[in-house]
Amino acid sequence: MKFIAGNWKMNGSRGALKTMVDALRDIETDNTVVLCVPYTMLGIDGGRASMGAQDVSPHAKGAFTGEVSAEMLQEAGAKYVIVGHSERRQYHGETNAIVREKAAAAIAAGLTPIICVGETMDEKQAGKTMAVIESGVRESVPENTNGKIVIAYEPRWAIGAGLTPTSAEIAEAHTLIANTLHNMGIGGTPVLYGASVKGNNAAEIMSIPNVDGVLVGGASLKPDDFIPIITSVK
Ligand code: 13P
């Protein structure tokens, strides 16, 4: 059984989400399916899919104009929330320390954070990929996870670019993450791969050891693209 999450980023509409939910209703799969949508689309019953958000405030409540708390997400029907996505790290200056606080806030409200880590092209070219991944995991995962986290490895240079690392590179990264989580006492935590996952590469990627599922961007927006990914694996 695999874990297949879509990240709609700032795309879609409530109408498009209803179309997706209807299309997912009859698919035959035991896989976990999650749709991480903009805040305004929460509240719609995901049916076969669990709903998730794409960010959360590290604060529980109060004078933080524009922010949305984990408890509010939970009340709106979210079960998951992406934290530390590379676009948040890149455009909003999120550090591992901030990501860790957000993940802790999510866990405290009963949500499962999907914690993203991954290297930039500069870091890759400087030979720092493994170091960035390991420190990303060690520094972004809160002390008490309650067994309720998911990790997503997203090589930042490959996102939305139609580029993917080689299978050997994905295997190396995922083995490092699995070992790091084991050493932190939380072995068995699901680890997803994300960046340019499509119907034609999803099954191969999910056959790589220690890849427990995928986090899909562009190809999660339309049923014709997303459903083949979900049904490509058992
Ligand atoms: P793409 O699948 O569009 O490359 O996006 C990946 C991603 O950022 C998922 O969170």
Image: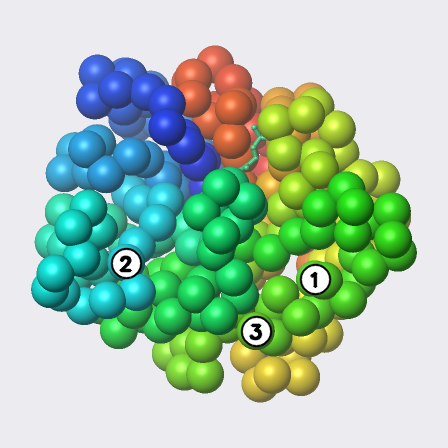
Tell me: 155 left or right of 23.
right
Sequence-wise, the earlier of marks 1 and 2 is: 2
Quick check: which quadrant has ligand 1?
Answer: top right
Quarter of the figure with residue 24: top left
- Looking at the image, which residue is at 85% across and 40% down? 166
Sequence-wise, the earlier of marks 2 and 3 is: 2
Quarter of the figure with residue 12: top left
Residue to which mark 1 is pinned: 133
Q: What element carries label 2?
A: loop
- Is the CB of mark 2 within 8 Å of ligand 1? no
- Looking at the image, which residue is at 39% across and 60% down? 113
For the residue marked with disc 2, what is the amino acid? Ser
Tell me: 151 left or right of 58.
right
Sequence-wise, the earlier of marks 1 and 3 is: 1
- Looking at the image, which residue is at 79% across and 46% down? 122
Tell me: 46 left or right of 193.
left
For the residue marked with disc 3, what is the amino acid? Glu
Q: Residue 57 carries which label?
A: 2
